[in-house]
Image: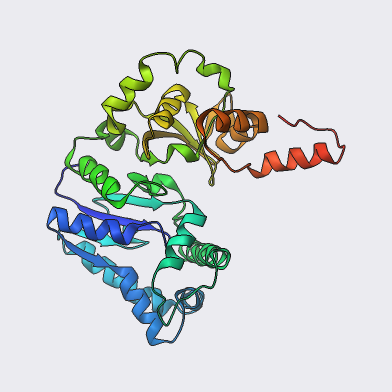
Amino acid sequence: MTGHQSIVLNGDLGSGKSTVSIELARRLGLRRVSVGDLYREMAQQRKMTALQLNLHAELDQAVDGYVDQLQQDIAASGDQLIVDSRLAWHFFKDALKIHMITEPTEAARRVLARPSGPAESYTSIEEARAKLHERSESERSRFLVRYGVDKAKLRNYDLICDSTRASADEVVQHIIAAYEGSFGQQILRDSPPLLLLDPSRIYPTQEIQGLRGLWESDDVAQIGQAGEEALEPLRIGYTGEKFFVVDGHRRLSAALRNGFRVVPGQLVAECDEPVVGGLSAVEYFRAEVGVSVIYDWDAAHGTQLPLPDHVLERTDAVLAGEPGNQG
């Protein structure tokens, strides 16, 4: 990155993008523009929730038309800005494009903890999680139909930041390092996005025996002393819902042992893209991630990876006495 571009951030509610964008603007001395604030004002003026306005916008193009024109005008101005918007990455062609993510229940907890406004309130974490998912899918469908772009596709972005356990300050430090050219430049230049993921949310694809000897060596301590940004990026696959290691299990294990809240990664395959042997990311994940792999990894690292659907399906089949592979 040149350090002279705008920075645009998107992410679903609860991902931390507003907090991060405010702090980025403060530290870099740049003006911040929030399309989300504008959208919430429009919802309140119509006495709607943000979800209701999203659903209304699927039928009334004037809603998106107004916001779109505003973003196009901002992008065309050439000003160096921090822009908090779910679609700015589509309108800003020359910007550092950041996608904020977090674990859905954590996102719901954050949103529920905010002071409730007149246009948006939830009564439980379960309701908040369901409504946030519904709102996100409404936006995703509208963007696909209206613009032909998928906001969930990671290759639309330069930098993916997982804020599940990382503080806003940590996230901001990593973004500024990438923006100013001291972190992740080869991936950002040659094969974006650069991933900054919570190591406790990354699934292993090999048995724990592959780590033999790591914990008794000096490698764990050396990685801890060097820090997160010095870690060689993991090679990561993504199913559209889950991240998994293609290469770098020992580095991931050492990161967990050192309490790292984010680790760098390179995206090698997303959804239908091939990983190895002709298998797509989804197929590879289903083939390599079984219940024993997850349980053994969790036991060794103190993590609690949720069992993915394909593992639950196999387990249910075994319990029902049907033929199948539990592993």
Picture layout, residue 294 above or below residue 149? above
Please give the name of the residue rendered at 59% of the width and 34% of the height, measured from the top-left corner: 285
Q: Is residue 273 left or right of residue 47?
A: right
Q: Quadrant of residue 35?
A: bottom left
Q: Is residue 134 left or right of residue 252?
A: right
Picture layout, residue 290 above or below residue 39? above
Q: Nearer the viewer, residue 40 or 149?
A: 40
Number of dots carrying numbers: 0
Q: Quadrant of residue 39?
A: bottom left
Expressed as whole percent of the image width and height from the top left, the position of residue 65 reads 36, 75
Looking at the picture, the colour scheme in use is: rainbow
Q: Is residue 167 left or right of residue 59?
A: left
Q: Quadrant of residue 63?
A: bottom left
Q: Nearer the viewer, residue 15 or 209?
A: 209
Expressed as whole percent of the image width and height from the top left, the position of residue 200 reads 47, 38
Expressed as whole percent of the image width and height from the top left, the position of residue 242 reads 53, 42
Q: Look at the image and tell me whether residue 147 can be seen.
A: no
- Check the picture and name the quadrant holding the N terminus: top left
Q: Look at the image and tell me whether residue 297 can be seen.
A: yes
- Check the picture and name the quadrant holding the C terminus: top right
Residue lying at the far bottom in this picture: please name it.
46
Please give the name of the residue rendered at 34% of the width and 80% of the height, measured from the top-left corner: 41
Q: Nearer the viewer, residue 147 or 327?
A: 327
Residue lying at the far right in this picture: please name it.
321
Expressed as whole percent of the image width and height from the top left, the position of residue 259 reads 39, 34
Please give the name of the residue rendered at 74% of the width and 42% of the height, measured from the top-left corner: 313
